[in-house]
Amino acid sequence: MSAATTRSRTPRTPDRLCAEAVELARAAAEEAAAPGIVGEHVSVVAEGDRVVTHFFECREAGYRGWRWAVTVTRASRAKLVTLDETVLLPGPDALLAPEWVPWSERLRPGDMGPGDLLPTDAEDLRLEPGYTGEDAPPPNSLVSEELADLAEAEDAALTDRVVVPERGSIAAVAEELGMRRARVLSRYGLHTAADRWDESFGAKTPMAQAAPASCVSCGFLVKIGGSLGQAFGVCANEFGPADGRLVSLSYGCGGHSEAAVMPKPPRPAPPVLDSMRSDEFPLRPTPDEGQIPPPDTASSDLGHS
């Protein structure tokens, strides 16, 4: 180990005159801050030969743990200590702002609002070039120059507007099929989206683990097209936790259409007594009910004859 290396690792001893200039350093700190903001003298550190930094406590609200650092120095063989710089520095336990993160890394799902624009990088791995605009038909293509000329002549006879793209061209066919986009989802973007959706509504979620069956056999599942249709669908159960969301076919919930079919309401048995018909109760009883019949006068006359 060289002498220079040993000297660099050995802590320097603060210069005596610079270390004693505490009041000079305090006055410089109070001039930079304000009276009453500079607190007690904390420590002194040797920065180099005849260069010393004095640290003072900072009492400014919102700067807990920060320190006023005042560096003083003196020339060689001089006894006059002069001021070098004054700055406010964070201490070991200082309250600091979080580390700055670029906006592209701070953005989270749901942060966008109405009117916000989210630019995409030209080299975004989630996207790849779509239709390039090349109109040269491949060999033996149905889109031939004759068909294009015939379509243009027919369109010119019907209207005088300029048609863009030209009818009968590959661009027109691509636009008709919904494929004329500058960039489309790449395989990487497709896989990352599928992993993200499967994490929210997939087979490993607690809801799916407790479900009686999976969405692949549910009547509320709406099929989607494309390659994603082999693994995902849209839930159409308004009472389910994923209504209107893209769900994995292996996902499931308690709202499965065939999990618990509601039984038909039981039909009551016919009544033993006819309690559905109203009985008539007269206010006065009829003559043949509860009354003694009047004497037969004719019979009494016959008996006395």
Image: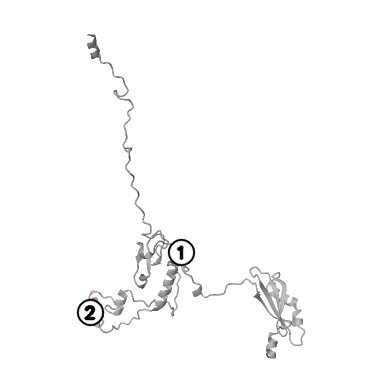
Residue depicted at x 23% and y 74%: 158
123 vs 233, nearest the viewer: 233
Span colored in magenta: 147-154
154 vs 65, nearest the viewer: 65
For residue 40, above or below residue 149? above
Q: In terms of secondary structure, where does tag 2 sit?
A: helix
Location of residue 221 (image quadrant) = bottom left
- Residue 164 visible (yes or no): no
Q: Amino acid at mark 1?
A: Pro
- Residue 25 visible (yes or no): yes
Query: Badges 2 and 1: C-beta atoms under 8 Å apart?
Result: no
The first of marks 2 and 1 along the sequence is 2
Please tell me how many numbered marks the rendered image carries. Answer: 2
Q: Position of residue 184 (x, y in %)?
A: 38, 76
Q: Is residue 125 left or right of residue 302?
A: right
- From the image, tell me which residue sits under label 2: 150
Considering every residue shown, the one lying at the far top of the view is 305
- From the image, tell me which residue sits under label 1: 206
